[in-house]
């Protein structure tokens, strides 16, 4: 088989953008994917009359006209931005805790202050000071990630960035309700406010407000297909239904990859979009210290997901916002503990892509219907302890608890269910090929921030590069950007 300048392992978000960037940068590139379609989490599936997003709830960072965000600039650099249509959401999310609040946060700083001060009177000055800190920490974190020397960084980043979100909220607010409403995005990062680095949450929240939340018309599958098409137009090669089982190295670094049929392809550069444990497991000769390092790091949570096709409109079922965060408690630590239990879910994220009828293309949900995705984070180890004969009983029993959790918004939801698809962490591990079905790679502790642990740059093996959520932050936007960043470094190093 022909040798390549570069081989990309995995056609997830980071793998796709890495492959397209490498090929467009002049490196003859092979993209290898064990599944028979591209996208990884960026795809969809059908059940009956409905087509469901596999994982995308809100695409962050797209931006608005005249103010494009990082993912949009990535897509522009690959020549596919004009092939896609984005529909912006006017709101960030609707946060509901019965007996405390039901508040919808607009994607606007001033509007968010107004709404939150109406819901929790007397907090306007506190909100303005808090949001000012969020913006400042975000600005200087981005500046630091671009390589600005620490001496030139505003001390606000080092003073407040590493603190926990819970600590910063406690400093600014006294009411549990307003703190819960402001922290509602924390499941997107997989760590509760008591342990979540403020700089990580500030960056997430700022990105959604400044660049708005969006959906892709045609779903994330349309975006994955567009990036793959750009790669192929540039002359790249792709092999689906093929698994990379080995990466052969020499004293000089990477020299070849080995496939599941035993064949090999020579290459000097490998960009892996696989998990870090799986990537190092492919090496014939892993660098010293890898086993100890991997043992120290904690794999992050997976999820329990219920996709529903509903024979009623979103409005008829009580959904007024695309993203809904519903909880029975103001105690976020209790919610996090609930992830390691099959006790009834204490909270649920509910995504209804059909609140705005122009978001979904014809065929995703027929007229008069809608789709709803319910999820709660959950660790895979919980399901490892369940005997196979009890698996389905626990699976569908826990799904019922998610339906109970969404009842404050939609009490009659069960009556409208036409299709249901239930996924446990084991399901996601099988579909995504991620260790433990992890949605965000390693647990997003402060040390996993790219400022402190840059796995994109340092793998210990010459010619081996890691791109995607296992190299840093999880989520669609970070993964899309990661693939481009890594590939550009490879192109530049080959040209030097």
Image: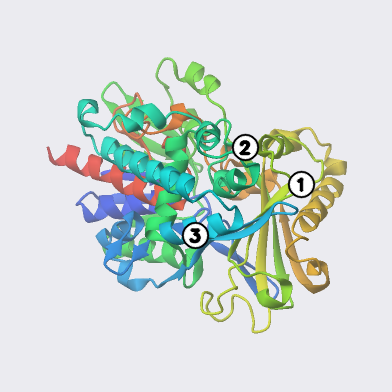
Question: CA gap, disc 3 to disc 1?
Answer: 31 Å
Residue at 81% x, 56% y is 404
Q: Nearer the viewer, mark 3 or mark 1?
A: 3
Residue 28: numbered disc:
none
How are the residues colored? Answer: rainbow
- Vertical position of residue 384 compared to residue 134: above or below: above
**Which of the two discs, 2 and 1, labels the residue nearer the N terminus?**
1
Using the rendered image of the protein, determine whether residue 89 is visible from the camera's viewpoint: yes
> Can residue 57 be seen by looking at this rendering?
no
Question: x, y (%) of residue 185?
Answer: 55, 48
- Estimate the x, y position of residue 368 in percent, counting from the top left: 68, 83
Question: Cβ–Cβ below 8 Å for labels 2 and 3?
Answer: no
Specify which label sits upstream in the sequence, 2 or 3. 3
Residue 121 shown left or right of residue 125 in the figure: right
Residue 267 vertical placement versus 67 (above, below): above
Q: Which mark is residue 114?
A: 3
Q: Where does the image place residue 41, in percent across and percent down from the top left?
A: 53, 54
**Residue at image mark 2:** 436
Query: Most extreme residue toward the bottom, as rendered?
Result: 367
Number of residues whose C-alpha sits closer than 10 Å to that of mark 3, classed few (under 14), some (14–19) or many (20 or more): some
Q: Earlier in the sequence, mark 3 or mark 1?
A: 3
Residue 345 numbered tag? 1
Task: Determine whether the residue tagged by mark 2 lies in a helix, strand or loop.
Answer: helix
Mark 2 is surrounded, within 10 Å at the Cα level, by few (under 14), some (14 to 19) or many (20 or more) other residues, namely many
Nearest to the eye among marks 2 and 1: give it: 1
Residue in the foreground of this view, choosing between 285 and 80: 80
């Amino acid at each position: 088989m022909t040798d390549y300048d570069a081989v990309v392992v995995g056609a997830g978000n980071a793998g796709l953008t890495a492959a397209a960037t490498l090929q467009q940068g002049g490196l003859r590139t092979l993209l290898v994917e064990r599944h028979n379609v591209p996208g990884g989490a960026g795809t969809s599936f059908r059940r009956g009359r409905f087509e469901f997003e596999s994982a995308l709830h809100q695409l962050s960072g797209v931006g608005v006209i005249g103010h494009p965000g990082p993912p949009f600039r990535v897509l522009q650099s690959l020549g596919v931005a004009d092939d896609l249509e984005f529909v912006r959401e006017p709101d960030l999310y609707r946060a509901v805790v019965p007996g405390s609040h039901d508040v919808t946060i607009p994607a606007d700083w001033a509007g968010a202050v107004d709404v939150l001060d109406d819901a929790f009177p007397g907090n306007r000055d506190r909100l303005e000071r808090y949001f000012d800190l969020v913006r400042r920490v975000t600005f200087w974190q981005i500046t630091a990630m671009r390589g600005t020397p620490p001496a030139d960084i505003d001390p606000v980043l080092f003073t407040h960035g590493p603190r926990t979100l819970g600590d910063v909220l406690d400093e600014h607010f006294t009411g549990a309700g307003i703190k819960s409403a402001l922290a509602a995005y924390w499941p997107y990062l997989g760590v509760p406010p008591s342990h979540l680095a403020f700089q990580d949450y500030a960056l997430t929240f700022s990105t959604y407000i400044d660049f708005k939340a969006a959906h892709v018309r045609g779903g994330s599958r349309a975006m994955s297909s567009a990036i793959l098409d750009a790669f192929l137009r540039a002359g790249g090669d792709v092999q689906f239904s093929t698994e990379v089982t080995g990466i052969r190295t020499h004293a000089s670094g990477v020299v070849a990859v080995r496939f599941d049929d035993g064949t090999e392809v020579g290459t000097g550069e490998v960009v892996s979009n696989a998990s870090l444990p799986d990537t190092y497991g492919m090496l014939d000769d892993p660098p010293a210290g890898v086993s100890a390092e991997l043992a120290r790091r904690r794999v992050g949570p997976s999820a329990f997901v219920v996709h529903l096709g509903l024979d009623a409109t979103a409005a008829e079922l009580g959904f007024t916002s695309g993203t809904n965060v519903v909880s029975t408690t103001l105690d976020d630590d209790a919610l996090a503990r609930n992830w390691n239990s099959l006790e009834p879910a204490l909270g649920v994220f509910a995504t209804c892509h059909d609140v705005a009828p122009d978001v979904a293309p014809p065929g995703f949900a027929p007229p008069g219907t809608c789709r709803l995705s319910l999820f709660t984070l959950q660790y895979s180890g919980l399901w490892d302890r369940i005997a196979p004969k009890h698996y389905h009983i626990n699976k569908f029993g826990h799904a019922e608890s998610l339906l109970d959790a969404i009842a404050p918004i939609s009490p009659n939801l069960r009556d409208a269910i036409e299709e249901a698809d239930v996924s446990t962490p084991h399901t996601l591990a099988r579909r995504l090929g991620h260790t433990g079905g992890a949605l965000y790679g390693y647990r997003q502790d402060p040390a996993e921030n790219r400022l402190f642990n840059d796995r994109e740059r340092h793998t210990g093996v010459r010619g081996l590069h890691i791109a995607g959520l296992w190299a840093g932050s999880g989520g669609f936007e970070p993964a899309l950007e990661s693939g481009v960043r890594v590939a550009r470094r490879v192109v530049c190093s080959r040209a030097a």
